[in-house]
Amino acid sequence: MKSLSGKQTALWSCAIGLFALIVGFSLPQFELFEHDSGYMLATLLVLEMFSVIVATLVVVISWQTFRIADSSLARVLIFTFTLVAGMDLIHALSFPGMPDLITSSSTEKGIFFWFAGRTIELFGFFIVLAKLNLPGQRWHWQLASLLSILVLFFFGTRHLDMLPALFIPDQGVTPFKAAFGGLITLGNWIAADFFWRTAARGYKPQRNYYFAASCFLIGTGELCFSTYVTANDFLVIFGHLFKVCAYVFIYLGIFSEAMSEPYRLLQASEQVLRLKQLELDAVLSHINAGVARLDSGGRYVYVNQYLARYFAKAAQEIIGKHFEQFVANAHRQEACDHWSKAISGCPTSYEGMRTGPDGKEVYISAWITPERNAQNEIVGAVLVVIDMTEQWRTRQLLSDSLAQLSDLNMALDAHAIVAVTDAKGVIISVNDKFCEISQYSRDELVGRTHGVINSKHHPKSFFEELWRTIAKGNVWAGEICNRAKDGRLYWVSTTIVPFVSHSGQPVRYVAIRADITERKRIEQQIKEMAYHDALTGLPNRRMLMERLEGVLAYSAKTNCYGALLLLDLDHFKNVNDTLGHDSGDRLLQEVSDRLVRSQRQRDTVARLGGDEFVVVLMDVGQTEAEASVNTGRICEDIIQELSAPFQLSDSLVNTSPSIGAVLFQGQEVNAAELMKRADISMYEAKAYGRKRVRFFDLSVQQAFQKQLALEGDLRDALKLGQFEIFCQVIVDSSGTTVAQEALLRWRHPERGLVPPNDFIPSLERTGLILSVGHWVIEQACVMLSQWRTDPVRRAWKLAVNVSPKQLQHPSFVERVSALLREHRVGRGKLQLEITESSLQENLQESIQKMRSLLEQGVIFAIDDFGTGYSSLSLLRNLPLQILKIDRSFVRQIDHDKKDAAIAQSIVSLAHSMGLQVVAEGVETEKQFMSLKALGCELFQGYLFGRPQLLDAVKES
């Protein structure tokens, strides 16, 4: 059957007490014993002594068992129930019929000590409810209670008459006594209510429910003492029974708190201890270490699972056996020595490599600690064994790594520049390399920042970005220019590594640097070579185009005009040919110096190559007219500056520039197009007589574009069969045909017959003259081969013009020789005409080629004589047979004495050198007669026939 709880017991007890009170008051009053009966005294004495014993037990329990936390409760209970026990004992001894105690016993005397006990009892309950902390020690209150008993005993025996009457014989209790009893009843019921509420809130419910029941029963029982007439009345006994029941609950409340609770706590502690032991066993069974206990004889009394596995045996097989049975012979003596130390009271440890039962090598670490009992006597030892194999290997690796790190550190110090700073950039340490390159001592650097070597080469933003990077804990790498103590600049490739704390904030920085000064010097040289002309030091084309793009952007931003000038030195080739290339290079250097001195600092002077220079002008005007005038003046200054003689060693050289100028505003025209326009203008300046400036004109560009289209068509003309051979007769003084000149014509499908002056220069410029010229010679050889069977034409010669590029080509002789052999051309039939300009380069090589072909029957004529720079020595050395007078001297020969005199001189010169003379451009009879009179042998011109197709020549 389930036992009742404290609350239920208290509740049922109060209900039963209330029911008993109702039943008792419903009965008529009667006496249980006769007056002064010994039975009555015995009964009352037994009941009172029960209360005294309970009160004494409460005091004893309060002295011995309450914890420090409840010491205040103990002081209240000791004081209260010592007084209650004393008052109840004196009350029992004061009953009528009991021996006199100082004064005679009486009902009124007994009632006084009863009220004193109940009042002190009620007072004590309210102190407990109020949780008042009584000061002092327990014995203080014990002494106070004993003194109080003496005081109350003295008053109750000597001065009871000072109080109102409490009992009148034959009348019963007085109204004062009934009223005072009612107050005690009310007070106890109030206390019972408070105790009940306190228990309901969960504060020490067992004790407070019992105290509530006790107060209720004391208060209820006090009602039985309010109406009796004699001490023998059954209500007196009934009231004492209520008090006994109440004290039973007081005892239960105190005992459950002070006596039962420790036993319960002891049981709980034992249970916790058992759980802890189980937990400890579980922990020891699963920890990665062997744990054992040994008795004083060295026998195992406990072994955890780990150590059992290490010994490769079950734990029960190990327990009770001596530790030496599980130690290898090689290590037994060492183990015994450590055991002796431990059992003598000295903890000891050892570690080393051991061979396990499975034969594997393991590295163990063991600790042996003496085990002592409560009397501090050594009763055995505790052994802890840990397998440190992995840790040992890790230590070995760490040791090797530290050795490698030390080697790396030495190598780093030997080859790198190292500095360590704190989080604020203050230098903590530097190596010798740092001191060596910076020329500062270690004492001069430590405690300062890197500002001491700042070269001011980098902008402030450079270092701000550096600090932003490393402050976030990121590695920064880059190149920094520093300044040494002597002012010398040096470059270092730098890597800065932050070391961060657990919070992620950098605490120090390590900067590792390598000296790259020499590399930067070489890079600078390479950059100079990449962006500057090696001869003059001026910007080259690459840098020019970059700067030009920048100037165009500036022009677009400011809306100002700029200008691009392209300069070419006139007759620069003559300087190289006559004075040598060294002098030519020196001239280019002098020209660049003069150009740089004559220009503003913000303008750019560059060399494109050869004898071409470029000047880029900024801010030449806000309007096109202003820009044109300013640019023109600058160009005239350049022409004047460069036209002054140059002193080259022992020679005084005169030259002049031809300048092409183009204006620009903004970026509507790109840099490449501006260069193209300047080039067009420069060539136009040369075409108009050199030593002048020409501004770019759109019509000139249109003509240039037309020329480019023409050149594009030229590239396919030979393949498409658009070239034709025309021939013009050459006659003797009698008008008889003695030769023909093969003339190249181009019949364009859209443009028709293109004049030679429109496409021959393009053939020369594009290099197509090599293939086309070879085709012309081939057609001439075919024609000569066909004439060989014609009785009239087989005596004719056939002249073909040869361009300078053809003559300079390495395989010119071989290719012509092959055609001669293929078509069996007769000796003296093929005549090759060269101009004076063809002989300006590689003269000796040209002469050698001419002589080689001369030996194969080819004859040579010099064409357009008098318009070039031929000298007499040149004519004397050339293997020539014919000299052709240019048409410019023939045009006015019949009425201009100067032209006649020049023609006479040419004829005389040719005859003196054994050369035949051919006069070109003969168009009138007067010209023909005048030339005959001067001694000219051969003639060519419209007077004798216009050029006609090769097929027509074949048919005529």
Image (cartoon, rainbow, N blue to C red):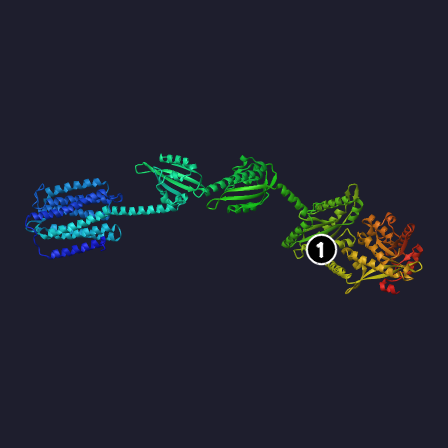
**Camera-side residue: 626 or 90?**
90
Q: Name the secondary structure under disc 1.
A: helix
Residue 390 screen position, x and y as percent:
46, 43
Q: Nearer the viewer, residue 527 or 680?
A: 527
Visible residue check, residue 802: no
- Viewer-nearest residue: 417 or 382: 382
Instruction: Please identify the quarter of the rendering in which residue 800 is found.
Output: bottom right
Residue neighbourhood size for the residue with mark 1, other residues' Cα within 10 Å, grouped as few (<14), some (14–19), many (≥20): some
- Identify the amino acid type marked 1: Lys
Quadrant including the N terminus: bottom left
Q: Position of residue 481 (x, y in %)?
A: 59, 42
Q: How many marks?
A: 1
For residue 574, side relative to residue 564 (left or right) = right
577 to 446, vertically: above or below: below
Indicate the quadrant containing the C terminus: top left, top right, bottom left or bottom right.
bottom right
Residue drawn at the location 42% of the way across and 42% of the way down: 386
Which sits in the foreground, 406 or 282?
282
- The answer to whether any part of residue 257 appears in the image is yes
Percent across and percent down for residue 331 are 42, 37
Q: Residue 769 vs residue 604: left or right?
A: right
- The residue under label 1 is 676
Q: Is residue 904 left or right of residue 59?
A: right
In x, y percent, where is residue 921? Answer: 87, 58
